[in-house]
Image (cartoon, rainbow, N blue to C red):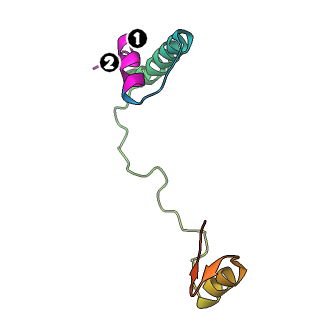
Amino acid sequence: MAIVPTRNKIEKLTKDVKVNLSEEEISNFESYANFVINKVNLLDNVDTNGVEPTSFPILNTTHTLREDVVTQDDHQIIFDKAQNKKGKYIVVK
């Protein structure tokens, strides 16, 4: 089912999300939305026969980031640098 962004749909959307657009902005949005949807619809013409679906595009990878280690020292450094404190809490204004 093709999505067609009509002027009426765009005007309803702007009311629903409480955004005021000028006539020119609505026209520009309609043109751009149609452009994007036409590009997405081109994917319907791609031959995917023989292509196995995947849920993650890169397989057999290793995690290269360090593991997060939280220590009490980390908390104390942050607490010591806080300007506004009340007891053992940081006061956010």
Q: Quarter of the image holding residue 28? A: top right
Q: Is residue 82 left or right of residue 44?
A: right
Query: Quick one: SS at disc 2?
Result: loop
In the depicted structure, whether residue 87 falls above or below residue 4 = below
Up the image or down, 25 lies above or below 60; here it is above
Q: Residue at x 44, y 20 (%)?
A: 37
**Residue 76 picture location, percent across and down:** 64, 87
Image check: 44 left or right of 60?
left
Please determine whether, in this image, residue 15 is positioned above or below residue 69. above
Residue 28 in sight from this viewpoint: yes
27 or 91, which is in the foreground? Answer: 91
Q: Is residue 7 magenta?
A: yes
Q: Amino acid at mark 1?
A: Arg
- The quadrant of the image that shows the N terminus is top left
Res 18 → quadrant: top left
Instruction: Report the span colored magenta.
Output: 1-15
N-terminal of the two: label 2 or label 1? 2
Q: Position of residue 78 (x, y in %)?
A: 66, 80
**Number of numbered callouts drawn:** 2
As rendered, which of 92 and 31 lies closer to the eye? Answer: 92
42 on left or right of 67: left
Q: Nearer the viewer, residue 13 or 83?
A: 83
x then y, percent, for residue 72: 59, 90
Q: Secondary structure at mark 1?
A: helix
The residue pinned by badge 2 equals 2
Which quarter of the rendering shows the C terminus? Answer: bottom right
